[in-house]
Image (tube, rainbow, N blue to C red):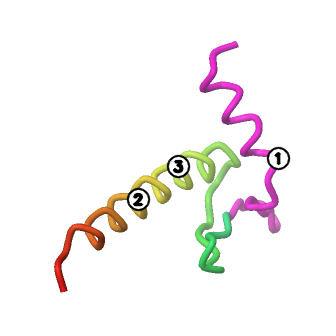
Amino acid sequence: MRATDYAKITHKKSSRFIKKNKHWYFKTREGEVKGPYETEEDAFDDVEFYIALMALHECGRKGRSL
């Protein structure tokens, strides 16, 4: 098992993921629900992308002068 595999397993246990009917969704810290996704793996992949996007957005905000 690789270190990245372990990280995926621990995140999947989070209550961030929701299955409703046949689709998967994930909840953001801001309280939004994103989805639907065909599989849990699709939702997991997109949550990783969402987190990276939010991190970039936050870096951009910190770099701005007021």
Q: Is residue 59 above or below residue 52?
A: below
The answer to which quarter of the image holds residue 7 is top right
Q: Which residue is mark 3?
A: 48
Instruction: Classify mark 2: residues with Cα within 10 Å, few (<14), some (14-19) or many (20+).
Output: few
Q: Tell me, for residue 13, which label it has, or none.
A: 1
> Does 13 appear in magenta?
yes
- Mark linked to residue 55: 2
- Nearer the observer, 19 or 14: 14
Q: Position of residue 25 (x, y in %)?
A: 68, 64
Residue 51 in the image, given as x and y percentages of width and height: 49, 57
The amino acid pointed to by label 2 is: Ala
Viewed as shown, does residue 44 lie left or right of 23? left
Q: Earlier in the sequence, mark 1 or mark 3?
A: 1
Which of the two discs, 3 and 2, sits closer to the camera? 2
Q: Secondary structure at mark 3?
A: helix
Query: In the picture, which quadrant includes the C terminus?
Result: bottom left
Q: Nearer the viewer, mark 2 or mark 1?
A: 2
